[in-house]
Every structure is written in structure tokens, then in C-alpha cells.
Image (tube, rainbow, N blue to C red):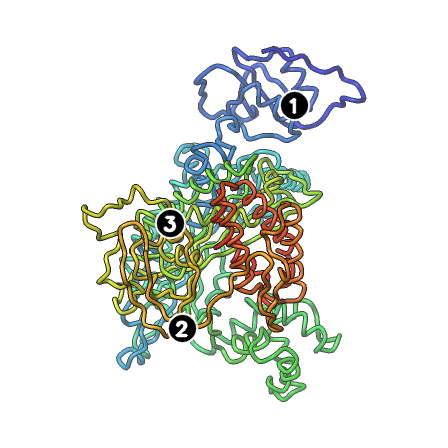
Amino acid sequence: MSYKPAPLTEANPISDLFKDIVIHINGYTKIDRVVLIKLITFNGGTVCRMPKKKTTSYILTDQDNFIKDGYKVIRSSWVIDSLEQKTLLPFDYDNMDIDCKHPNFIEDYYSKSRLHFISMEKLQLRNKYLKISNLNSKNQKTKKLNRLIYYMDFDSFFVSGSIVKYNRVNKYFPIDIEKDCVLVSNGSKHSEITSLNYIAKNIVKISRHDYFETGKNKYEAYKQQNQESNMKFYCLKVEFNEYRDILTKFYDFMASKFETVIPMSIDEGMFFEFVAEGSMDYFAIMKKIKLIKLKIKQITGVFISISVTNDFLFLNKIILRRVKPDGIGVCLSNEDFIKEIENIKVVDVSMSGVFMNNQLKEMLPSDVYNSEITVKELKKFIRNEFDDDYNKFFQPLIVKTGSNTLAMKFINNIFLLKDDPVLTKNKLGDKEYYTPKTVSCSINYHMNFTNLWDINVFVKRFSKYLVDRLNTLTNFYESINKIGVIVVVALEGNIVSKFGGMGNNVKRLSKSLTCDNFIKIDSNSCLSKLSTDFYTLIKLLIDKDRLNDIKGISLQILKLKNNKKINISESPLNFNFKTPDNKSDNDTISKKNRRSTHSKETLIKLIDSEDKETLKELPLDVLEDLYFQQKFDFTISRSSKRKLISTNSNSLKKLKTEKNSPVILVSDNVRTPLNKNNLNVFEPISFQAQKSISAIKNLVKNWITFSISTNAAPTSDDVELFLNFLKNLRENSQQSRLDNVVTFMNNHLQLYQYENDESGVINDWERIMLLKLLPLME
């Protein structure tokens, strides 16, 4: 491969893309060595003859399996691709599975991301270490015990963990987290900063939201202004195995010291200790937490901050924020509470501070208010002007905003010295409360879809990954009842500055689906059911002609059933009836011959009969036959006696029912009875009379538009009429015409996805589309 550089003209200006980059070219390269030198130097970089660890940024070579300790190795294609994309790519970008369509994208890329680590490690920690002491329940025996809350937080967790790994390898040149500026990032120009230490945050003023290049520039500016400083700059990579090892050592130790262990997040934990009244010893507690800090530093190599309060979680978090990093704080009495709270600024009060600070600007005289007013100054004003009656001072605000608002949170926390309901629940130690109610996995980078098949395959792989994660948490969860998806799409003018990122102008679209019965997590059909329903929900959200606008996909389990023994009386199934799970080998229909992967409850929804109780007693293979044949030309009274007359192995031949009010099926040139309370859009015509697909699509469009504009849901008669028309198309081998009409309806319905739907009509249409129309398509 040869590469000829373009002439340096005004149309091809020199860039500073490789500014401050020093590259050593070693051995064989696919692009001519002279060309590479020109490309690098013309764009602000430097080529050195001999590599030095302190100054050389990369070694460039195209030799296979080239490794040199302490150096980042790049290939000649890295130079070309960086210039083409006008951004400094990660040095190992060509080895990364950066295309979401790659078979190993989930396992080799997403599973190694910070986003995945945060979302899944918390579940794993609670799954393994969550334990609640019996003393936490407020019974007569424990009412006389005081609950001490130990709240512990790792200081700059990702940075600390990466430094532990770095210092273990580089023993003679260790990083000092208390003196050096340290970032965790992949080091490319527009890469995000995963984590940073307090020196970088508070002294150099680097933000977590800065790009790596911005953070490095801030450090260089700081060094120019403080040339006498010995501060060094380090950029470390993420070390997930190291982080897991630290967390395991930490919780193994803490579980041996406390009866109540509650992992709050990957870097925060809450621990309870119960002591008798009058036996709380401030100095004993201080000694204990100092020993804990030393032990944690010894076994993990990282610093933690600890705060302890007497059953006051709100104050605990305030103290913790004040003493970080590497600090301790203990507050046990009401006098200590008041003193601690009075020293904080109103704006820094957790949850309600910003709101109250804005309100005080209007409520206080200009000579009293300032943006950094403290709680002590506010109390002094109330004492002087309102005789220490805080109710009188705050009453106008409570009347204005309501009693259950941020104003009341502020009063409860600051003046009444008590936790709000959310924090009170956090202290209850109810194991079910701490069991996460939702599980989700999100990917918002390297999205690259060209057709619906790409999305279908991606969703199947993503669903398998999600189910595998759920299977590791089966002692928490038994089954799924509600799922949802979020699709992130690019809007006009979206600019993607980060390699593989979403961009700066995107919108999130969401859909959810509830199942009447739970999907067993450990069942064989769980994966196929989830992947099918996830894919269907995504199709409802997107335009198949604009798949390249997709910038992110999130698959969500929105409602989970805890792993408890099922009460048979609560089950919707008749256990005396034979089901596919307990069929004998003599049954003529095998699982392999089933034509649908839908669960039982979904098939009942698709059939949409009023006699759901009878349907729930039928075997799955019978329901599937009903689903595909769609022979439901009757209604059944809910009060009628449900009885199965006869069945065979293939279909339901007959149901004995008591007819109440028969449905009038509208055929050619027959009108339905007028009903002023219903919306009969098809009257006085029938679909069969319209042979032109364009005319039928026009009719359907008017039906949807008029229904939504008048907030009148489509009647069951109209829907049944339309379904009969679609079935006739399918039975007469006109599947393509059916697909054409349903696709048109789906696309037209998507035009209303951002509309206000207080009446629920749009939701009714989407439900009809999802459960009745889309399943008819090939």
C-alpha cells in the first residue's frame, strides 16, 4: 500500500491534530516512511529517532505482534484514519469491536465499558452482600436501642483503583493521589473523562464533563501559572478487574464487622450498628472508624471517607460531603446536629437547597440575603424578625407551593431535625426495598444500522446478554411482568464530536409493554419472548428509512417479581389442565412444531376474546392454532358458564357459550347500526368495495386522523371489520397488500408519538397496532 500526500496548498492547510504528539517509526510500515513523517509533521506532530518513555507518545509499526513495554503501539492506518475523521483516535481503535453489528460487540466492547460496570456491579454487590439484621425491625425489644448509621464512600473510586494497578506495576515511580493530577480516560482528543481525583477537580478545575483534551489544556495552563509546583499529570485507563477486586475485599471485611450491610452504589455503602441507650461513646466510635479506615487502606490500597450519625441519614450525607476526601465525622446528639447543620450554606442543603436559595431571594430583605447565606444566618433572621417562629416565616411559601414540597423537606431536615420519607425508607432495612425493581442495559455509542435485519440481530444478542445477567440474580428475581425500550435518535443539526458517540442534538423515544402473566426468567421461552417483544417495540418507534439516525438503544425490564414461592391460589392457570410444560411424550404436537414463540398471555391478548378465563385453561398449542386461524366470530357473556366441549390436538372445535349481544360483522353494502356514542368511520362503505390499495390507505388515514382529533377511540366493530379485511387478504395469498396497508398505518401513527395523549386514544391505537395488526405481517 502506498500513500501520496496531497500538496500543501491553501485548499489543504496544515492542522495541529498531532500537536504535542511524539512518534517513533519502527521497522516495516505499509505506508512509505517519508510520507508518514510528512503527514505527522505537517499536522503538528514530531517524529523521533530513538523512543524515550518520558517523551515518546506512540511507536508506529505495521509489524505483526509487535509489543514494547511502556509504549502505546499504533499502525500507519491510525495516522490516515485520524486525519480523515479529524480527531485523535484511540491508539488501539483498530482492535476494538466498534461496530454494534459485530457478533462479539456486546461481550468484547460493551461488557468492558464504564456504563456496563456501573449498572451491573451494583446488582452483583447487593446480590452477594446485602444483609439486614433482625434488630433493624422496630419491635418492643429494639425500641430501646439506638441505630448508628455508618456511611462509607470511596474517594475518586475509579482513579484510586487505576492508581493501585499502576503503582503495583511501576513501584519505583508511583503516583501520589494527594499531589498529582490524575484522570481516567482512554487519552484520545475527544474522549470522555471517566473519573478524576480531587487535585484535578478542586485545584486544576477540571470537570467530569470536559473532554480529555480540555482537561489536559487546563493542567498545562495551571502549570504555566504555578511553575514552582511539582504536580505531575497522569492519564490512566479503566481497570475493571482491579475495581471488582477492591470491592470484594472491602465488602468481605465489612460483612464480618456489621450485621446490616447495604451496598448503595458501586462506591458507597451503608452499615448499621445497634447500641443500648446511654452507651454511645463518641471516642469509642472515633477509634473504631479510624481502625476501619486503616484496615481498608491496608487491604485495598484506596482511601475511604466515613460519617456516623445517630439515626439521621440526611445529616450523615451532609457530614460525609464535608469531610471528603479521606475524612471522618461523627455526630450523635441533637446539640451536635444543630451545630453541624448551622455551618452549611442553604444552597448546599441536599435535595431542597437550590430551591430554597431561590425562594429566599424573594423572601429576605436585600441587606440580609446573599447567594451563600448559611443556615445559621437564616435562623438568626427568623429569631429576630419572627420571634423564632419558623412556621410563621415559611407559611406563605407552603401555601404557595403546597405542603408536600421541597419547602417542607427543608423544614423537616433543618428545623425539625428529621429525615424525609425517602430517607426514612432507606433506614428501614427492608430487604425487598433494596432489591432493585428495574434492570436495564443501555448502549449509546457505535450505533450503525442499515436495515431492520441488523436491528433484529442486535436486539437478539442484546436480549441474551440481559437474560444472562438476570440469571445471575435469580435469588432476587423470579419473573418479568413489564418491559420497555428507549431509542435515542439524532435530530437535525446533530454534531458528533466524540468518536462513536451520540452527538449534541438527540431525542429519546420510549415504549413499554405489560404482560398479564409473568415471564419466568429461567424458562426456555424467556429469551425468544423478550427479544421478539423488544424488537416489536423498537419497530413502533423508528422509521425504517432513517435507521442511521439511531444513536442509542436501551432495553429495560421495568417490573420484576421477587423470588418468592408462588401461591397456587394466586396463579391464573388451572393446574388440573394439561399444559405444554407437563405434556406426555404421547401428545401429537411437540414443542418443535409450534409456530409461535409468544407466551400464553400474549396469545390471549392477540386473540382478544372476552372469554379470557376459558382461554387461560387451554394448552399453548391450541391457543397458537386459534391465533393463526383467527376463528373468533362471536362474543361470550362474562357471566356465562365457561365449559370446554371438545378439543383435539390441533385446534379448538367448539366452545359452549351463552350469546349476549352479538357483534354485527359489516360486509359489502351493509351499514352498522348508528350509535351516537361510537365512532363508525367506515360508514357507509366497506373495505371490500375498495379494490385500490391507495384508496384503502386513504380511508385508513382518515380513520386514524379523525379518531385522534376527536379523542374518540376506535370501536371494536370497526377494528373487527378491518381485521376481517386483512384476514381475507392473507387467506387469498395477498400478503404483500396486507403488509403495505399495515406498514402505512404504522408510519402514519408514528406522526402522533409526540402529541399530548391525555384521552389515551393514541395509546389505544398503538395497542391495536402492536397486539393485533403487526402480528399479521410476515
Residue 304 visible in the displayed image:
no
With respect to residue 264, does 406 lie above or below? below
Q: Which residue is mark 1?
A: 45
Q: Position of residue 249 (x, y in %)?
A: 32, 48
Q: Are marks 1 and 3 in contact (CB under 8 Å)?
A: no
With respect to residue 29, does 217 lie above or below? below
- Mark positioned earlier in the residue sequence (2 or 1): 1
Q: Residue furthest front?
A: 669
Q: Secondary structure at mark 2?
A: loop
Distance (Cα) linking label 2 and label 3: 27 Å
Q: Quadrant of residue 193?
A: top right
Residue 647 visible in the displayed image:
yes
Q: Mark 1 belongs to which amino acid?
A: Gly
What residue lies at 51% left-to-right and 33% top-to-bottom? 98
Q: Secondary structure at mark 3?
A: helix
Q: Nearer the viewer, residue 641 or 767?
A: 641
Which of the numbered marks, if any, corresponds to residue 311? 2
What residue lies at 59% left-to-right and 76% top-to-bottom? 407
With respect to residue 737, does 321 lie above or below? below
Q: Are marks 2 and 1 in contact (CB under 8 Å)?
A: no
- Mark positioned earlier in the residue sequence (1 or 3): 1
Q: Nearer the viewer, residue 322 or 97?
A: 97
Q: Are marks 2 and 3 in contact (CB under 8 Å)?
A: no
- Mark positioned earlier in the residue sequence (2 or 3): 3
What residue lies at 31% left-to-right and 80% top-to-bottom? 143
Q: Position of residue 355 (x, y in %)?
A: 63, 69
Distance (Cα) linking label 1 and label 3: 42 Å
